[in-house]
Image (spheres, coloured by chain):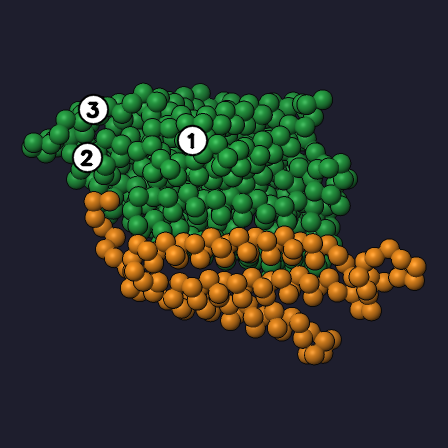
Chain colours: A orange, B green
Amino acid sequence: MDVLGLFNYWIVIVLMMIGFYIVISHGNLVKKVVGLNVFQVSVFVFFISMSKVRGGTAPILEEGIEVYSNPLPHVLILTAIVVGVATTALALGLVVRIRDAYGTIEADEIIEPEEDGA
Amino acid sequence: MIAAHLPALQVVVPLISAPLCLLLRRPGAAWTVALAVSWFALAVALSLLIEVSIGGPVSYPIGDWAAPWGIEYRVDQVGALVLVIVTAIGAVVMPFAGASVAHEIASDRAYLFYTMYLLCLTGLLGIAITGDVFNLFVFLEISSLSSYVLISMGQDRRALTAAYNYLVMGTVGATFYVIGVGMMYMMTGTLNMADLATRLPAVADTRTILMALAFLTVGLSLKLALFPLHTWLPNAYTYAPSVVTAFLAATATKVAVYAFIRVYFTVFGEVDLFEIAPMVPILMVLALAGMFVGSAVAIFQNNLKRMLAYSSIAQIGYMVLGLSFASVTGLAGGIIHLFNHALMKSALFLALGCVVLRLGTVHIDGLRGLGRRMPLTMAAFVVGGLSLIGVPLTVGFISKWYLVQAALEKGWWPIAGLIVLSSLLAVIYVWRVVEIAYFRPAPEGSAAVEEAPIFMLAPTWIMAGASIYFGIDATATLEVARGAAEFLIKGAP
C-alpha cells in the first residue's frame, strides 16, 4: 500500500478540504454553493473508489466475466448525485431570491440588525 | 391484506399526495388533501404502534426483496413512537394551518406550502421507519430540502438568508453522514441496520469504524442542532412562517435525535460504543453546555420566537444528556423528553402563531397586557412555559424527573444538580413573558384585539391540554418509552 496506490483517497481528502474551506471562508453565496458541490463530489469519488475491484469489469452477466466491481456504491452515488443536484438547484434559487430582496449576494453585505419588531 | 402494507402506506401516501397538491393549485383543495393525509398518517402510525407493542417489531421488505439486499422498513417501539409524534403534530397543526397560511403566505403560493409540507412529512416518517442507513440519508434529504423551502416562505426577507444558512449547514451534515455510511459499508459490505449491528463488532476497533462513528456523530449533531452546531436553528425558527416553526420545532430535530439513537443503539448496539471512543464525556459536556447556553441566551431575547428557538437548543441538550447516560432510565428519559418536548414546543409556537395573526408581531413589548386581551392564547402559552420549566403536573416535570433519576442511579450528583439549575433559567425567560402579558397594562390607544379563531385555538389547546394530561397520567407514555429503551439497550434488534 504505497502512496500512489491510495491516489484516489488522497484526491478525495484534497477535494473535501478544498470544498469545505470554500464553504467556510467565502462570503459570496454562489461560491459557497460551488464549494458545497466540490465537497459532495469528493464523497462521490470516495464511494466509487472503494467499490473498484482490481482487475474487475462492469457487472454484466456474460461468459468469461468472473471478477467485477461492486455495483452497489455506484447506484448509491447515482442517488446522491440526484440529491446533490436538487440541493444545488434549491440553493441557487434561494440566492436569486436573496439578490432580489437585498440587491447583493455577498454575505457580509446583507448582515442587518437582528433585533427589531419582526 | 392491506394491514400488512401499513409500513409502506405510511410513507407512500404523503409522497403521492404531494404532487397531487401541486396539480390542484387551489389553496382550499390543497389544504383539504394535506389535512386528510395527515389524519390518515396518524391512523396508520397509531395502528402500527399498537401492532408493535403487542407483536414486537414489524419488518417490511420493499418490493419483496429480502432484507440484507433489499431495503427493509422496520418498525419497533421507538420508531412507532416517533411515527406517532410526527403524525400527531402534523394532524393537529394542519387545521391551524388553514387560517395561518392564508394570513402569512400569498394565496397563489399556498398550494406550494402544502406540497412541501407533505414532502417534509414523507421524509420525517421515512427516517423513522426505514431499516437501511442509506435510505435514511435519502429521507433525511427529502425532509431537509422541503424544510428549507418551507422556511424560505417566511414574510421577512431574512427568512431567505436563514433558509440558505440552514441549507449549507444541513447539506454539510448530511454529507458527513454519508461519509460515515460509506466507511461502514467499506468494512462490512452491508447497509441494513440489523445486519450492520451483527457485523460491526468484528471490525469495531479499526480506525475506519472510529472515523465512521465520528462522521456520523458530527453529521447528525448538525441536523439535531446539538450545541455548538446549533447556529442555523435560531434564525430558521424565527423567520419561518408560524405553522412551519410549530411543525419543524416539534418534529424535525426530534427525528434527527431519533436517527442519532438509531445509529448509537441499533447500528452500534452490539459494540461497546462507550469503550472504543470517549463518547459519554463528549456528549454529556456538549449536552450540558447546550442546556445552559441555550437557556441563558433565551433570557436576553426580545423576539419571542427566537427566545423559544434558543430554549429548543437547551431542550435538545436534555434529550442528548438522557441518551449519553447509556442506561435504560437515561435513554427512557431522553425518549420521553422527545415526546414531551414535541407537545409543549408545538403548543408554545402555535400560541405565538395566534399572536402573530392578531398582532402581527412577536416582539415582547407588543405583548403588553395581552393576557387580558387574548386570555385563551396566553393561557396556553403559560401552560407550555410551565412545562418548559418542569413544574409538576406538566409533562416537563416527568421528563426532568426521569433524567434526574438516571443521573442519581449512576451516582452523578453534580449532573442532577445541573439539570435542576438549568430549569431555573427557564423560569426567568418564561416569567418575563408572563410579567409583560399579565402585569403590564395594554399600550394606550391600541386597537382592540380579539381572540384567535377557533380553528387556531383548538389545535393550540389540544397540545397544551396534552402537555397537562400526559403530565398527570404518564403511565402510557412511560410504558412505551421504557419499553423502547429496554428494547434498544438489551434486546438484540
Q: Amino acid at mark 1?
A: Arg
Percent position of residue B421, x then y: 33, 42
Going by the image, does B172 lie left or right of B57?
left
Question: For the residues marked 3 and 1, what is the alpha-carbon distance in whole angstroms?
Answer: 29 Å
Q: Which of pointers 3 and 1 lies earlier in the amino acid sequence?
A: 1
Determine which residue is flagged by label 2.
Answer: B367
Which structural element holds mark 3? loop
Question: For the residues marked 2 and 1, what is the alpha-carbon distance in whole angstroms?
Answer: 35 Å
Q: How packed is label 1: few (under 14 Cα within 10 Å), some, or many (20 or more)? A: some
Which structural element holds mark 2? helix
Q: Quadrant of residue B359?
A: top left
Q: Which of pointers 2 and 1 lies earlier in the amino acid sequence?
A: 1
Seen in the picture, residue B271 relative to A9 is either above or below; the reply is above
Question: For the residues marked 3 and 2, what is the alpha-carbon distance in whole angstroms?
Answer: 13 Å
Determine which residue is flagged by label 1.
Answer: B26
Give B205 or B223, whichever is nearer the viewer.
B223
Percent position of residue B61, x then y: 72, 36
Q: Amino acid at mark 2?
A: Leu
Q: Amino acid at mark 3?
A: Glu
**Which numbered disc, 3 or 1, marks the residue closer to the eye?**
1
Percent position of residue B440, x then y: 12, 32
Determine which residue is flagged by label 3.
Answer: B450
**Res. B59 mark:** none
Question: How many numbered discs?
Answer: 3
3 and 2 marks on the same chain: yes
Quarter holding the C terminus of chain B? top right
